Image (cartoon, rainbow, N blue to C red):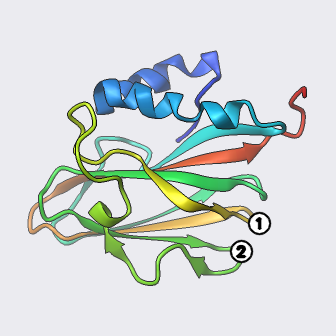
Amino acid sequence: MRINVYDSMNNALLSQWETRFGSYGAQALEAAATVRGAANYEPFVFALPEDSRHTLDARGTYDGRLSMLPGTFITHITASSSEAAGMKVQITDLGTNATLFAKPIQYQNMSGQGSASGVSTPVFLLPVPKLVIEPGLISISIQNLATVPNLVQVCLFVAQPAFFKAV
C-alpha cells in the first residue's frame, strides 16, 4: 500500500491508518509536513504487508517488495505486532543489496519506544535518511517470533521525488 499523505483522494486509506493507530496516527501523518514543504519531494507511507489484518503463522516468515522512485529517502519507520514475542525485521535496498540493519532486529528496536497518545510503538525518525537508488526496489523480511499466529505490519515513511511538483 502506498499512501500520499496529502492527497485528498486517499481519505479511505488515511482513515484506515488513523483507525489502526488512533489519534497518534493523525499526529504521525502531520509530522510529514516538513516533506510537504520541500521542493520536489512529497511524503508517502508504504506498508507491508498491505493488509493491516495480515496474520503470520506461528514462527512464520513474510517477504515482500516495495517499488518506489529512485531518489526516495526513507525518513521514518513504525511497526506493529499483536504478540509480545514480536518479530524480527530486515529492510534491504535491492539496488545495492545494502541492508538497513547489520542483522535482522527486533521490531521494538526499529520502531519508536515509549508511549505517545496510548500507542506503544510510535514512529521512529531515522538519524540519517536512507537514500533508495535504482531500480527503486526495497525488500522487507519479517520473521514471526511468536509460537502463535501474529498480526504484523511495517510502515516506511518516505520523501519521494515529485518530478512535476510546482515550486
Residue type marked 1 = Pro
Name the spot of residue 126 as percent of width and height, x first. 52, 59
Local crowd at mark 2 within 10 Å, few (<14), some, or many (≥20)?
some
* Label 2: element kind: loop
Residue topped by disc 1: 135
Residue type marked 2 = Gly
Q: Residue at x 23, y 42 (%)?
A: 115
Judge from the rendering whether residue 43 lies leftward or rightward of residue 157; answer left or right.
right
Q: Is residue 145 above or below residue 115?
A: below
Q: Residue at x 38, y 42 (%)?
A: 51
Local crowd at mark 1 within 10 Å, few (<14), some, or many (≥20)?
some
Mark 2 vs 1: CB contact within 8 A: yes
Q: Evaluate whether residue 146 shows in this view.
A: yes
Name the spot of residue 128 as percent of width and height, x first. 60, 63
The residues tagged by marks 2 and 1 sit, at their Cα atoms, a distance apart of 6 Å
Name the spot of residue 145 as percent of width and height, x first. 19, 71
Q: Is residue 4 above or below residue 158?
A: above
Q: Is residue 101 above or below residue 115?
A: below
Residue topped by disc 2: 95
| Mark carried by residue 113 | none
* Label 1: element kind: loop
Mark 2 or mark 1: whose residue is earlier in sequence: 2
